Image (tube, helix red, strand yellow):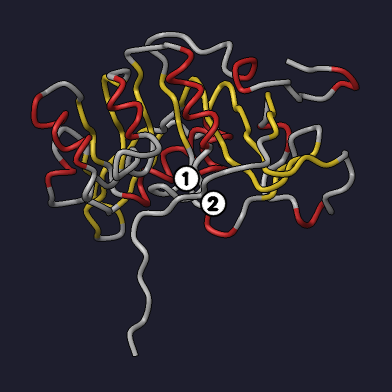
Amino acid sequence: MTGKHGNKIVASVADALAPLKDGMTIMVGGFGLSGNPEALIRGVVERGVRDLTLVSNNAGNLGKGLATWLKAGIIKKVICSYIGANEDLHTRMASGEVRVEITPQGTLAERMRAAGAGIPAFFTPTGAGTIVEEGKEVREIDGKRCLLEHALMGDVALVRAAKSDHFGNLRFWRTARNFNPVMAAAAKLSIVECDSLVENGAIDPDDVHLAGIFVHKIVQVPEHENSFEYRTVRKR
């Protein structure tokens, strides 16, 4: 998966997504419409793969982002933590077209972090005594009712980074660090869409948010829509 100079740079989004196959579990970074790997998301639809299991925070919104996968009918299951006003997911969930597994947001992130760290499962009090508990092993730890949650691994992670060097050492923009790093570590194949590409050594080691050992392919995409869901301003 390396190109000239031993780096991981690929020439196009199509090249980056060439390994994708039907039925894969694909993790996609971002939060709603913020911090999405926009070009990679479009590229998956163009690639024509189907029957995907999507792992993301909330599968897009307002018909944009990952909602385009729903519209294209390429998703069979979504593992997420929030549906909100995503009508594309609501309607397909209600019709049975798409199966949806809701996981508390912190648990979702920890399941992926555990996968990247080689931890097969962990206990958490989150969700105990609620519908989240159904079908799970329960144990009392230090007087708290805890649920056994299993690590969540993906076949592919689509990651958006603000900056990458040729080895794949990454820096993320602000809260894009919420899901992108753990997804990259949890997937067998991590594909990075970066805003800025720099030479190896240009990112200070103290400024690296994710080590390049977790990254397999890098495609530079300088221009993004960077859409967001709702603009909220203070009224005087």
Q: Which mark is residue 176?
A: 2
Q: Is residue 196 above or below residue 50?
A: below
Q: Is residue 101 above or below residue 21?
A: below
Q: Which residue is at the front of the view, 120 or 223?
A: 223
Q: Residues within 10 Å of mark 1 (few under 14, many from 20)?
A: many
Can you give x and y, in whole percent of width and height, for residue 45 in the image? 42, 20
The residues tagged by marks 2 and 1 sit, at their Cα atoms, a distance apart of 6 Å
Q: Which mark is residue 214?
A: none
Can you give x and y, in whole percent of width and height, for residue 91 in the image? 13, 33
The answer to which image quadrant residue 215 occupies is top right
Residue at figure coordinates x 47%, y 21% from the top left: 44
Q: Amino acid at mark 1?
A: Gly
Residue at figure coordinates x 28%, y 54% from the top left: 125
Q: Quadrant of the C terminus?
A: bottom left
Can you give x and y, in whole percent of width and height, for residue 201 in the image? 89, 44
Q: Residues within 10 Å of mark 2 (few under 14, many from 20)?
A: many
Say which label, 2 or 1, has the lower sequence index: 1
Q: What element does badge 2 sit on? A: helix
Q: Which residue is at the front of the view, 173 or 183?
A: 173
Q: How many marks?
A: 2
Q: What element does badge 1 sit on? A: loop
Can you give x and y, in whole percent of width and height, for residue 193 in the image? 62, 35
Residue annotated with mark 1:
30
Task: Report if the CB atoms under discs 2 and 1 are less than 8 Å apart.
Answer: yes
In this rendering, position of residue 33 left or right of residue 168? left
Q: Quadrant of the N terminus?
A: top right
Q: Amino acid at mark 2?
A: Ala
Residue at figure coordinates x 42%, y 49% from the top left: 31
Q: Residue furthest left?
A: 95
